[in-house]
């Protein structure tokens, strides 16, 4: 497995032989963010057609798409970099994650509600709050 080899080579995991052998992270769970774990297993946190947003190029009227892809990437990174494997194992997610999940629309499929998704300012703590 390519990921397994990369994780071993980068010293992200340790292995132990024998009856009680197996693999474990090379660092304590409270020092490994969920973002790092996802990157090891799946690669980039956010991609567009399999390409990382900074590697995209748009021209003409589509130029504004690049910042559009960078913005959610920034939010995803901020959230997942702030949560560790230990947080998840202890069911102790940071308050800012809980606040995001308290938004009723967070649990619904926007396509089933006849709307295209959240508008700017719907995220708690977003200073650009705008009413509908």
Image (spheres, grey):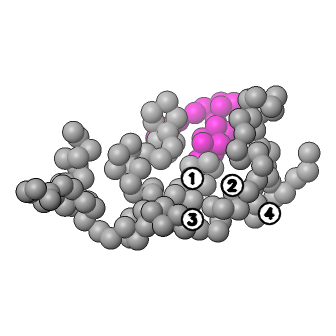
Q: Quadrant of the N terminus?
A: top left
| Sequence order check, earlier mark of 2 and 3 | 3
Secondary structure state at the residue bearing disc 2:
helix
Please say if 73 is above or below 10: above
- Overall secondary structure of the magenta section: helix
Is residue 103 in sight in this rendering?
Answer: yes
> Which region of the structure is painted magenta?
55-70
Q: Badge 2 local density, few (<14 within 10 Å), some, or many (20+)? A: few
Secondary structure state at the residue bearing disc 4:
loop
Secondary structure state at the residue bearing disc 1:
helix
Specify whether residue 43 is painted magenta. no
Can you name the residue that lies furthest to the right here?
Answer: 132
Specify whether residue 63 is painted magenta. yes
User: Circles 4 and 1: CB distance less than 8 Å?
Assistant: no
| Sequence order check, earlier mark of 4 and 2 | 2
| C-alpha separation, residue under disc 4 versus residue under disc 2 | 18 Å
- Residue drawn at (41%, 50%), measured in percent from left and top? 38
| C-alpha separation, residue under disc 4 versus residue under disc 1 | 18 Å
Which residue does the numbered mark 2 point to in the structure image?
101
| C-alpha separation, residue under disc 2 versus residue under disc 3 | 11 Å
């Amino acid at each position: 497995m390519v990921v397994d080899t990369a994780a071993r080579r980068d010293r992200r995991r340790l292995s132990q032989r024998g009856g009680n052998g197996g693999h474990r992270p090379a660092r304590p769970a409270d020092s490994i963010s969920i973002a790092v774990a996802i990157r090891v297993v799946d690669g980039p946190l956010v991609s567009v057609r399999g390409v990382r947003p900074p590697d995209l190029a748009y021209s003409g009227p589509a130029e504004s798409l690049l910042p559009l892809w960078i913005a959610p990437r920034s939010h995803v990174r901020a959230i997942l970099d702030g949560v560790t494997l230990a947080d998840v194992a202890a069911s102790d997610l940071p308050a800012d994650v809980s606040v995001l999940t308290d938004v009723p629309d967070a649990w619904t499929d926007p396509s089933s509600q006849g709307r295209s998704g959240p508008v700017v300012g719907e995220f708690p703590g977003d200073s650009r709050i705008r009413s509908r």
